[in-house]
Image (spheres, rainbow, N blue to C red):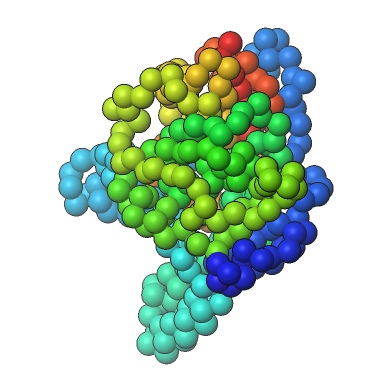
Amino acid sequence: MDVRTAAHMPLEQTGTTKHYRYDTRTTPPDVFEDLSTTEWKTLSWSDLGRPYLVDNYSSEREKWENRHGEDMPVEVQWEHFNRRFHSLFMKDPDEATVRARQDLMDHLKEADVHGAMEVVRDLMQAKIWNYVHRVQDAVWDPRGKRALFEGLDVENPNILFLGAADGYEAMQLLAMYPGGHAVLVDYDEFCKTDRFGNFPEAYPFLGDDPATGSHRVYHREDFDIDFVVSDIRDLDYGKEFDIVLSVGLIEHFPDEYKPLVFDFHRRFLKPGGYAIMTTPRRQLRSKLFYVAMGNLMNYGYRELMDARQLGLYAYENGFEIKRAGYIKAHNGLVTQKR
């Protein structure tokens, strides 16, 4: 599917390419489980319990630390994660399966049990990724993200995306609220050059057309985006953004650092602006995902929490919860400074 095909894609369609699922359906069912009426001020950690800590780290981290004689720095953890995660996006699952089966036969012919087991692991991980990303569409989850992002009181929004990676959610916001500008921030240059730089040009973002008042499809080339390679702590913006966004950021900070990460969301917001945050859900399928995939992609501190835990963290750190709930694989919050 090339850009020209995607640009003329009719609404109410979903299907797959080699690398992703696309979805232009406008009336999706069951995309957002709304917990917005929760009485946040009455919740306590004794009621909710603490987040689940994912502690099965990649063997590559252990090898790195043995080789260098020190703990792997956080920056290096993210460099490894980004490259491994991006490699999953770039794989053709059908080609990977054929190649893995041939490699498995070669190892078995040579009685190479260790090599055969590694191929089986790689094949299992490829099949899990294919199911989660291309079949279930749980990574990008456009219908869930659109449901979470809808109804914001913004026009031509200025958006700051903290820890932006491929920038997906900022592009979805720009499609829903056209005419805006996004600044993507990540301290790994690879995210700018590869994860965002090689984001599929044909991917269709369902959004709104101000000229017609109806839906239309946008692509990456339609959006006004700057990518800044920087540590979030070094940003020198003022309170100039209508939306400050993070996706899968908060769960990488232990509790003693969570006030700091919430302050990152607050310090750049205009009065009345929105801080939008998502984290991976604490559910059985997420735990099983990291059991199977941890060796490939887990290099640093990582929690799984539920939407009420995420909401309580935000409430305790000075945010009013405007919307809270679950989408497929993530908790989601839309908040404003209290």
- Corner quadrant of residue 281: top right
Q: Position of residue 143 (x, y in %)?
A: 70, 48
User: At which x and y percent is residue 161?
Assistant: 46, 36
- Report the residue at 57% width, 30% height from top: 276
Q: Left or right: 139 with respect to 238?
A: right
| x and y percentages locating residue 264 in the rendered image | 42, 23
Q: Which quadrant of the figure has residue 131?
A: bottom right
Which residue is pictured at 38% across the width and 20% down the height? 238
Note whether residue 330 is visible.
no
- Of residue 291 and residue 300, the one placed in the foreground of this image is 300
Above or below: residue 307 compared with residue 115: above
**Most extreme residue toward the front, as rendered?**
211
Q: Is residue 70 above or below residue 141?
A: above
Considering the image in quadrants, where does the N terminus appear? bottom right
| Residue occupying image coordinates x 52% and y 52% | 222
Q: Is residue 76 left or right of residue 223?
A: left
Residue 120, how many percent across, how many down? Answer: 50, 72
Q: Which quadrant is the C terminus positioned in?
A: top right
Residue in view at x 42 percent, y 87 percent: 106
